[in-house]
């Protein structure tokens, strides 16, 4: 109790000192403002005095001119005298108008201190319970892992004085924890993780008084085998309800993207040509997020950073394409019923293509000029293909 009393006295003394400091600053401002008003008033008095002197001199000159006994001389000076009188009258009227425009209240220091906010603050000055929130608890029944996404749920524990929560996970390799969420919700979904990896998560509660300890780590295992479905990446693309059949309403090429991005491990998926017009050109491969979906896969150029890699095929031949450049051309196309396989190895960054279970040419190495090695290696890829209204594809991933 003694320490609480001492703390209260010290706080009040600091507030009183702050109030005195504010009083002194207001007095300084008031004195400066008063001095400014005095200078302005002195300036107006000086202007009025000069105007009065000029008027007096002008009147005296005109009085002397009226005494002139020679009519000819008077008539010669009449025009000059009249003009001078008009100038004096205009100057006096201007000075009087300026003085009349200045409200009497503006010439005074009409200020008062607004003490209401301070009075309200003083009336609300009281004790608060200064407690650190309790350590939250995970709710295992509400935590889950689907593909490479995890959902983590927790609940607060007494004392319930939290304002937010901070959730952290590691890198899936027992590395350092990094914050992935900070807010007042008690559930968070994190996607884009590595497949077949074990992640640790921990959470703490925060308030103005401080933060609780972290919870013991919760372990979550992402799926060992990746699966995905195709998404409707463009309005012209039609995807079946199961996400396993894709068609296009446009005769222009449109790109379809998979629902999951890969950044670690080896992944394989297949396309089956359900319908195929021999005029169709189809591109199978991968793309990075942000790829232009209104182009042929692999055709886009984005400065020095292209976002698509593919094997481009028609009914007679095939070739590789990246950043709009064609290479590794070979004979042999596709037809209805053919199965095209795509194998992505993100660990060594290679792309391999198969036609009816037979590998086509050598592995293709993914690379992007103009990027650092670390940036290239960390860039996730999505399964992708481009087609138009001349072909329907079945997808098995």
Image: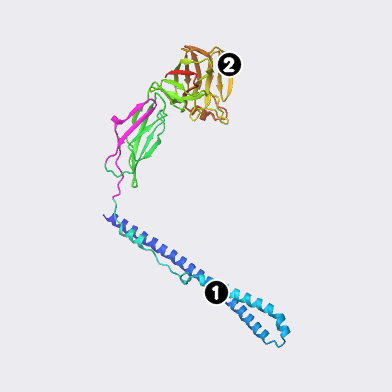
Q: Nearer the viewer, mark 1 or mark 2?
A: 1
Q: Residue at x 54, y 74 (%)?
A: 96
Q: Residue at x 33, y 47 (%)?
A: 209
* Location of residue 193 by image quarter: top left
Q: Which residue is mark 1?
A: 96
145 left or right of 386 in image? left
Q: Which residue is mark 2?
A: 329
Task: Mark yes or no: residue 348 visible.
Answer: no
Image position, residue 223 (x, y; %): 37, 23
Q: Nearer the viewer, residue 68 or 106?
A: 68
Residue 383 is labelled as: none
Please tell me whether mark 2 sits on a helix, a strand or a loop. Answer: strand
Image position, residue 395 (x, y; %): 43, 19
Q: Nearer the viewer, residue 70 or 258?
A: 70
Using the numbered discs, state the Cα–Cα distance from disc 1 to disc 2 in whole angstroms. Answer: 95 Å
Q: Earlier in the sequence, mark 1 or mark 2?
A: 1
Q: Which residues are magenta?
A: 129-157
297 left or right of 224 in image? right
Image position, residue 259 (x, y; %): 42, 26
How many numbered discs sit on the rendered protein? 2
- Above or below, 331 against 30 in this view is above
Tell me if residue 149 is in the magenta stretch.
Answer: yes
Please tell me whether mark 1 sits on a helix, a strand or a loop. Answer: helix
């Amino acid at each position: 109790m003694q320490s609480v009393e001492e703390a209260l006295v010290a706080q009040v003394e600091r507030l009183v000192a702050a109030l005195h400091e504010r009083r002194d600053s207001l007095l300084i401002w008031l004195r400066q403002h008063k001095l400014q008003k005095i200078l302005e008033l002195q300036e107006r008095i000086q202007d009025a005095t000069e105007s009065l002197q000029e008027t007096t001199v002008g009147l005296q000159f005109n009085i002397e001119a009226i005494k002139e006994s020679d009519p000819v001389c008077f008539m010669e000076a009449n025009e000059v005298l009249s003009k001078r009188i008009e100038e004096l009258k205009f100057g006096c009227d201007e000075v009087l108008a300026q003085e009349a425009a200045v409200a009497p209240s503006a010439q005074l220091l009409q200020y008062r201190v607004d003490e209401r906010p301070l009075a309200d603050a003083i009336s609300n000055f009281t004790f608060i319970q200064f407690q650190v929130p309790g350590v939250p608890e995970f709710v295992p029944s509400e935590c889950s892992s689907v593909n490479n996404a995890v959902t983590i749920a927790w609940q607060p524990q007494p004392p319930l004085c939290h304002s937010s929560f901070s959730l952290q996970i590691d890198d899936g390799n027992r590395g350092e924890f990094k914050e992935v969420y900070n807010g007042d919700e008690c559930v968070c979904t994190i996607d884009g993780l590595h497949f077949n990896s074990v992640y640790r998560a921990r959470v703490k509660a925060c308030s103005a008084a401080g933060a609780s300890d972290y919870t013991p780590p919760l372990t979550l295992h992402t799926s060992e085998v990746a699966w995905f479905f195709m998404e409707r990446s463009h309005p012209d693309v039609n995807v079946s309800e199961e996400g396993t059949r894709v068609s296009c309403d446009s005769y222009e090429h449109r790109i379809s993207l998979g629902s999951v991005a890969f950044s670690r491990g080896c992944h394989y998926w297949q396309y089956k040509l359900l319908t195929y017009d021999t005029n169709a050109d189809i591109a199978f491969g991968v793309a990075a997020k942000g790829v232009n979906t209104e182009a042929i896969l692999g055709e886009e150029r984005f400065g020095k950073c292209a976002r698509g890699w593919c094997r481009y095929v028609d009914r007679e031949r095939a070739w590789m394409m990246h950043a709009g450049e064609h290479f590794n051309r070979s004979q042999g196309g596709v037809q209805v019923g053919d199965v095209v396989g795509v194998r992505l190895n993100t660990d060594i960054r290679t792309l391999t293509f198969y036609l009816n279970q037979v590998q086509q040419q050598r592995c293709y190495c993914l690379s992007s000029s103009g990027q650092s090695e670390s940036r290239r290696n960390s860039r996730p890829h999505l399964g992708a293909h481009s087609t138009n209204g001349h072909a329907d594809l079945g997808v098995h991933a």
